[in-house]
Image (tube, rainbow, N blue to C red):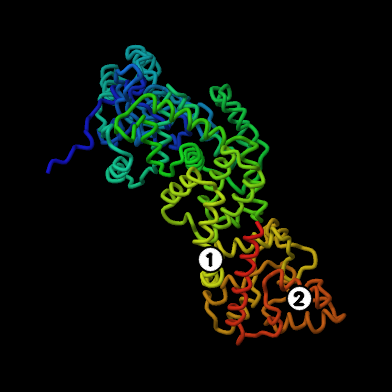
Amino acid sequence: MDIEQKYSVNHYLVSALLNYVDNKEIAIPEIQRPFVWDAAKVRDLIDSLYQGYPIGFIVTWQNPDVKLKDGSVSTGKKILIDGQQRVTALTAAILGHTVKNTDYEDVRIKIAFNPKKEKFEVNNPAIEKDVTWIPDIAPFLSGKQKQSALRKSYCSLNPDVDEDEFDELLEGLKEIKTKEVGVIQLAGNLDIDAVTEIFIRINSQGVPLSQADFVMSKIAANESYGGNLLRKCIDHFSHLAVKPEFYGKLKENDIEFVNSEYFQPISWLRNENDDIYDPSYVDILRVAFTYKFSRGKMSDLVSLLSGRNFETRGFEQSIEENTYRELKAGVMDFINETNFKRFIMIVRSAGFCHIKLIRSQNVLNFGYILYLKLRSQKYAPEKIEKYVRRWIVMAFLTGRYSSSPESQFDYDIKQTELRHFEDFLKDVENARLSNAFWDVELIQRLDTSVASSPVFNVFLASQCKMGVRGFLSTDITVKDLIEQRGDVHHIFPRQYLKDNGLSRGQYNQVANYTYIQSEINIKIGKKAPSDYLGYVVNQQCHEGECKYGGITNISDWERNMGENCIPVATSGMSLADYQEFLSQRRILIAKRLKEYYFSL
């Protein structure tokens, strides 16, 4: 059986490789992102070349040949998908190009060379003052400084140096440019899955790129349809969402982006500190693509960005052009301040008041996809809010995107195109939120010691939405406690259970958790519920001293227990009743979740 060769291996002189980069025959998409290597790694790379050591293969992916509108064929350029840092380091040290630091400032990395010791070092003030060093090798290696001029200036400062020997050393330094670098060139007709697999197999560090990384590389390498600036927009939005203070540095250092159509639409982030939804570049790509193309698989976007016609299997310029246009529109809708803030408002209106209640970014991603899709389909705003709220909560409760999220995204978004969303939602509710779910499955899923349980987090969100009070609190709400970085505490105190021989998995059951003011929890200490709740019922609510919170009448106490789904009978419970307590509370929480869901 003949197996098609998926790649070719070539060796290029360093000078030829840099020439290809300068002529843009090889695109370095990552060059617009911060250079993550420190200067010492650049020095070590140059030293390896000087010593004749290999510096590893770089990997390029040939863009497929695209059929143009006039019927002719355009040869695709090569995209550098592995080795960006090494190639960028070479352009910095040898050609004298600037690199962008983490503040997106253009800086020079100067590598110095000591001919006497044949040693490289990162330039510093001490080296600048030491005449035995050539402070920057770039002017010489790039051809801007002639060898005769360098010899003359160096030898005049170092009269003990023999000029002929010095010339030999410079010839050795110059040979850095004639050293070979291995290039693995992946075939342009490979699909993204094959490229991903090959990359994983040949990557020396064993760190696979995600398909989103391939997408970003393709976008950044395409200047014909403004992909380079679109890539910056995605990067800068995700960075600003986490660090609004980056705005000043961005405005100062990336003039090209500031002058683009993307700068103003993301400028609102400079005053935004809400962290409920801080999307990464992967999230932005996924949402914009799925919303605009009604597809959930990122590999499809890679193909479309190459102009792939899924029917003919060929590549067409018109498809490539349309893909960039639609993707840009999707990104612009994503970053729109009104859209983004209204979506966050919907999430918060379901009770998710803090990032700690959200354990699945994919749920939020599809929630935003759904918001943008329904808005584009002209659904009434109040319907959009209801549908998105319910969908998010349903997805959290059922773990809808916990496995094979791309396939689930693909199925769900296609359904929004095929029928009215309310009909689809009802079908999902009937299938996944039956009585068996509420009465059996949900209760079973509450039998866990994992504090970050998505089901328990949704219960906390329901408490926030309903404005209920913390356990034994008169005025402080669960929402207040969560927003003020409060912690969950144990209704049956942890130390009480621990002292009685229970294991971590037993005393840390989520059904034993509740939000309570720290000062009340401290007074409870390690007392059994029959002790501290018994006191509240029998003495505090009958004009006794207020020891555990400020509740002073039975009806208010019973209401508070109901708000927190804690059985009233807990006031008489001790160790022997712990398992029964957990069982009863799980049932109460499941019942509350059902009421909450259908109230959304």
Can residue 185 be spotted in the picture?
A: no
Residue ID for mark 1 = 434
Q: Tag 2: residue type? A: Glu
Question: Is residue 150 positioned above or below 13 on the image?
Answer: above
Q: Quadrant of the N terminus?
A: top left
Disc on the earlier residue, 1 or 2: 1
Question: Is residue 346 positioned above or below 170 on the image?
Answer: below
Query: Residue drawn 54% across and 52% down?
Result: 423
In the image, is 273 to the left or to the right of 547? left
Q: Quadrant of the C terminus?
A: bottom right
- Helix, strand or loop at label 1? It is loop
- Of residues 253 and 70, which is closer to you in this image? 70
- Of residues 571 and 338, which is closer to you in this image? 338
Q: Position of residue 460 (x, y in %)?
A: 64, 62
Q: Tag 1: residue type? A: Ser
Marking on residue 258: none
Callout 1: few (<14), some (14-19), or many (20+) C-alpha neighbours within 10 Å?
few
